[in-house]
């Protein structure tokens, strides 16, 4: 069967037929037709479907925003003649739906209503009539008055007519939510009382207009003039968007095949063909913006109300205000997303919002960030609902920030998606709503929630701030710019006085401990930017046991647990409840010229948002004089993906077990720092620090010294000197070491190859010729520290003359390793004719060992003075002072380069006494025929007497006055040496 499209609907139908129409326009959104499961049989066929929007002269109504004289729709269904030549429908139509063109609306509030009892009793007020329905049966069109009904709850509009047999038929309006938001008109359960084969529904554009008097009330049947007492107000309005065609769609099923729908399309047309909507540029469009926070305190979380007002007119002879297609609202710079809102915040997923259907969403309450209210002239009551935060990435814009607006009322549901773009540098917010429904509204208001977890925050400084809206109408009208300003005038005083405290959990001197630093500001303070902190001398970390994170991983925030030394917590956002995030602190290799660094890593998981990973690098340097640690962090981040962080507090806790330890000096000290703000202000901060119970620490380091150099033992010669300091574990660290060398040694500065000038030493530029030895220290670093020993001109300032007075040269030792440098200085003086060397103000840092070598030979600075060092013990008097002021005074026997020798021997009846020279600290062993092997530990002696018991056989021979011939073997192992000296001498012991 070929579908036909009737053109007769564009002609004025006189008499009982009042022009076919069924295109009513409502004010608000509607639900789309949902067909149930189709039965197995075929759908009813729509033989013809037509749609016409016309002027009073019958020509098509094509002016955008105009109020047509009338709108008609027509359905025609297949029919046949029965045996009595009656025209009957092949199937009885049951449910009809007309999808009106998008933007074509009607205002049911402009016409009085009829109640259901009035309709059923045929007593609807004449003023409530909005058109005529014609049912076609047996080739005859039977007209009925169509009334504007008082809609039942949950329905935006309803129209009704009383058909044959007093059957009330209702035309229900709905909105295509999630689609083009056009209006649907649906007739359900058409009566089968008459065997009707078609219908024509005509709705008047201005129902109270006198031109309809002859079709109003009883005049429809009896003729005459039936005027309306209602105001002459427009009921129908053309779309405000221009388009080449005005397309309507019809759907129908039958009583015989309920739920199986046939569909037809029709366009408004004239004799020449389809017509569309024109003249969009003629429509007025004068929207205005209002925007202001709910509170005016600088920097605080605040609710925010943004409203758009579009003036509406009820002039039936004029043009309607253009509808809003696109709105771009840019909040003032300084108004930003508040990170404090993230705590407990949720997001609405696509499955929960269901943008493309008319059901209310299932978004969680935690995703609500405000309310929306829409006041439209098409409904008696405003639509109201909520603003929901959209799920990151899974939103129509695939963006970080998006919001959904959901408003409902009177059976209408509006769902809109808005793209929110934060400026990546300033955080300024721009919200865009595009392709908005072609539905008129007078006021559209978004109110973002107030309180400490408000989604938005005020600017941080006082002043006047302006919101700008760029508003574009449907059609060809120009974009209109509207602004509104507000003034922030409370809590204006700003400064920068952040709080700072730092310290260890366990204060015991020398003990391992965790360390915590807390930094915080208030909303009245400028934002945090830079942090530099210096630890008290002696508060250090055991780097040797930590694997350093490589630079690439440190920058990327992917360091492993082997590099982790602590945790961090960061509070972000204004108000009393900032949002807190946690992360890790990792030890890295060199950074920005410092030997070590930190990688402070915070995964930015804020409520429903994953903003990536924030990495703040810090340089960790070591003071060369005190070994104190200074940490200088890179500028703290102030914005992340367009969201200003407004950092409120920062906590760093170094808690790796066994990593940090306290000083062994319990003198009062401070953790100091400098905190900078984003405005450029800096504040010096300090937190008192003092270790406790340092006196309980032991202090008894081990020290060995030796002279070496073959042939360098006599007067004027220059032996080398070595010293090995071995502190005990868990003792206090050394603060001062004074060594008084044997009288046999003197300083010979004139023998040095050259001296370094103090100015050269100050800039670490001593010449190579001033090197007089080497030094090495093993410590808490991964590698030993080592350095040349430089010989430096000495001087002092005379307190009276203020002149520079020459003194004995000094030793300068710039120990270096793993990028760390520790400068040691030793002064020299002569006390009681003995050379005294003093290392003072040593850093409070633990050493596993320290080795010092002063070269001898050609340019040796130590000289043998007036003796032969092999002729007696060479002992140094050493005074050691710990950081806890405990002292350890020891006499150190110095090994010499003298040959191992037996200087003399004697005996008793029981033992052989050997005077052995060339000894030092170490172990001596004597064995041989007739002798019992004897071992002795030598601590300080250079020449020592060793008593060696005879064997029983030798003693018996001596007792019988017989001579005993022994071959004595003497072996000496110097402390710290793997080689032993050995001599053998044959002696005759007389009995």
Image (cartoon, rainbow, N blue to C red):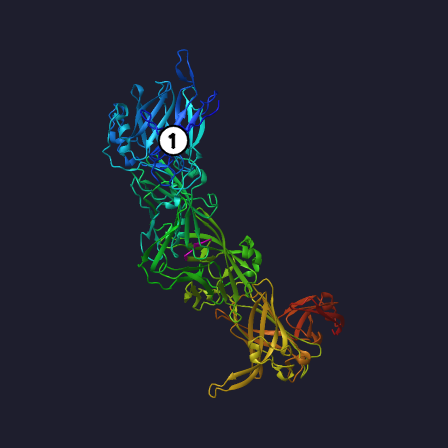
Which residue in the structure is indicated by mark 1? 10
Q: Does any portion of residue 547 appear in the rendered image?
A: no
Vertical arrangement, residue 394 with respect to residue 747, above or below: above
731 left or right, relative to 157: right
The residue located at (67%, 72%) in the rendering is 946
Question: Measured from the top left, where is residue 389 in percent x and y?
Answer: 41, 45
Residue 270 in the image: state x and y as whole percent: 41, 33
Nearer to us in this view, 253 or 459: 253
Instruction: Give residue 543's quadrant in the image.
Output: bottom right
In the rendered view of the protein, which quadrant contains the C terminus? bottom right
Q: Position of residue 483 (x, y in %)?
A: 35, 54
Front-lying residue, 943 or 194: 194
Q: In which quarter of the image is residue 182?
A: top left
Magenta part of the protein: which range?
641-648
| Residue 817 is covered by the magenta coloring | no
The vertical placement of 282 against 156, above or below, is below
């Amino acid at each position: 069967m070929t579908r036909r499209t009737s053109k007769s609907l564009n002609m004025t139908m006189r008499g009982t037929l009042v022009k076919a129409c069924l295109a009513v326009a409502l004010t608000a959104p509607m639900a789309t037709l949902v067909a149930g499961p189709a039965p197995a049989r075929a759908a009813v066929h729509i033989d013809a479907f037509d749609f016409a929007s016309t002027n009073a002269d019958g020509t098509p109504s094509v002016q955008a925003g105009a109020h047509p004289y009338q709108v008609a729709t027509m359905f025609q269904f297949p029919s046949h003649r029965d045996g009595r030549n009656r025209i009957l429908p092949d199937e009885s139509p049951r449910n009809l739906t007309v999808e009106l063109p998008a933007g074509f609306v009607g205002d049911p509030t402009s016409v009085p209503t009829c109640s259901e009892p009035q309709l059923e009793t045929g007593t609807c007020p004449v003023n409530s009539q909005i058109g005529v329905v014609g049912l076609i049966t047996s080739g005859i069109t039977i007209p009925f008055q169509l009334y504007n009904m008082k809609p039942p709850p949950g329905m935006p509009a309803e129209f009704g007519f009383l058909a044959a047999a007093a059957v009330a038929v209702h035309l229900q309006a709905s909105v295509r939510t999630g689609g083009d938001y056009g209006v649907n008109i649906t007739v359900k359960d058409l009566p089968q009382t008459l065997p009707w084969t078609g219908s024509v529904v005509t709705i008047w554009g201005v129902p109270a207009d006198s031109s309809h008097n002859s079709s109003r009330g009883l005049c429809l049947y009896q003729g005459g003039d039936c005027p309306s007492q209602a105001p002459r107000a427009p009921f129908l309005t053309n779309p405000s968007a221009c388009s080449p065609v005005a397309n309507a769609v019809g759907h129908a099923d039958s009583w015989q095949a309920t739920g199986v729908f046939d569909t037809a399309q029709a366009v408004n047309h004239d004799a020449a063909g389809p017509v569309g909507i024109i003249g969009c540029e003629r429509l007025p469009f004068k929207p205005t913006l209002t925007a202001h926070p709910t509170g005016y305190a600088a920097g605080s979380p605040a609710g925010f109300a943004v409203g758009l007002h579009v003036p509406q007119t009820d002039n039936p002879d004029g043009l309607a205000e253009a509808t809003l297609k696109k709105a771009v609202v840019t909040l003032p710079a300084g108004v930003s997303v508040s990170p404090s809102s993230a705590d407990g915040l949720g997001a609405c997923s696509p499955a929960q919002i269901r943008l493309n259907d008319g059901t209310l969403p299932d978004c969680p309450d935690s995703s609500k960030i405000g309310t929306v209210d829409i006041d439209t002239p098409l409904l008696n009551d405003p639509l109201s609902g909520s603003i929901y935060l959209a799920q990151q990435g899974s939103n129509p814009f695939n963006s970080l920030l998006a919001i959904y607006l959901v408003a409902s009322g009177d059976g209408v549901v509006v769902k809109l998606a808005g793209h929110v773009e934060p400026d990546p540098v300033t955080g300024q917010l721009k919200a865009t709503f595009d392709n908005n429904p072609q539905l008129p509204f007078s006021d559209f208001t978004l109110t973002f929630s107030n309180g400490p977890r408000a989604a938005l925050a005020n600017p941080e400084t006082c002043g006047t701030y302006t919101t700008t809206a760029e508003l574009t109408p449907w059609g060809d009208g120009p974009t209109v710019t509207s602004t509104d300003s507000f003034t922030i005038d409370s809590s204006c005083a700003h400064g920068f006085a952040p709080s700072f405290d730092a310290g260890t959990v366990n204060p015991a001197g020398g003990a391992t401990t965790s360390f915590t630093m807390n930094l915080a500001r208030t909303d009245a303070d400028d934002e945090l930017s830079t942090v530099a902190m210096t630890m008290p001398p002696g508060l250090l970390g055991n780097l040797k046991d930590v694997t350093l994170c490589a630079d690439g991983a440190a920058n990327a925030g992917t360091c492993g647990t082997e590099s982790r030394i602590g945790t961090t917590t960061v509070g972000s956002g204004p108000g009393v409840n900032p949002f807190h995030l946690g992360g890790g602190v990792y030890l890295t290799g060199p950074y920005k010229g410092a030997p070590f660094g930190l990688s402070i890593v915070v995964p930015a998981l804020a409520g429903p948002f994953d903003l990536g990973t924030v990495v703040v690098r810090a340089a960790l340097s070591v003071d060369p004089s005190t070994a104190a640690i200074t940490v200088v962090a890179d500028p703290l981040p102030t914005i992340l993906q367009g969201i200003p962080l407004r950092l409120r507090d920062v906590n760093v806790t170094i808690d790796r077990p066994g990593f940090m330890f306290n000083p062994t000096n319990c003198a009062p000290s401070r953790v100091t720092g400098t905190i900078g703000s984003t405005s450029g202000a800096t504040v010096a901060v300090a937190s008192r620090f003092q270790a406790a119970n340092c006196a309980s620490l032991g202090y008894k380091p081990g020290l060995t010294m030796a002279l070496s150099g073959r042939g360098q033992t006599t007067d004027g010669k220059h032996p080398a000197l070595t010293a090995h300091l071995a502190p005990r574990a868990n003792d206090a660290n050394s603060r001062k070491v004074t060594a008084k060398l044997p009288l046999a040694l003197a300083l010979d500065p004139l023998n040095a190859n050259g001296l370094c000038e103090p100015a050269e030493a100050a800039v670490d530029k001593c010449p190579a010729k001033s090197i007089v030895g080497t030094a090495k220290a093993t410590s808490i670093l991964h590698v030993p520290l080592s350095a040349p020993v430089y010989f430096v001109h000495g001087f002092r300032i005379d307190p009276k003359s203020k002149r520079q007075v020459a003194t004995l040269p000094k030793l300068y030792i710039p120990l270096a390793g793993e990028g760390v440098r520790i400068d040691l200085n030793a002064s020299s003086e002569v006390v009681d004719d003995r050379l005294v060397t003093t290392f003072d103000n040593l850093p409070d840092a633990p050493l596993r060992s320290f080795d010092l070598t002063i070269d001898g030979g050609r340019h040796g600075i130590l000289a043998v003075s007036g003796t032969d060092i092999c002729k007696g013990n060479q002992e140094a008097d050493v005074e050691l002072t710990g950081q806890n002021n405990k002292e350890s005074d020891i006499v150190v026997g110095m090994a010499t380069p003298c040959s191992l020798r037996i200087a003399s021997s004697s005996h008793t009846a029981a033992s052989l006494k050997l005077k052995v020279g060339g000894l030092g600290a170490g172990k001596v062993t004597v064995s041989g025929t007739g002798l019992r092997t004897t071992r002795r530990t030598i601590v300080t002696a250079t020449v020592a007497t060793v008593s060696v018991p005879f064997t029983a056989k030798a003693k018996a021979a001596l007792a019988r006055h017989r001579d005993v011939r022994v071959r004595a073997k003497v072996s000496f192992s110097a402390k710290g040496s793997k080689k032993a000296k050995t001599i053998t001498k044959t002696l005759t012991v007389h009995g």
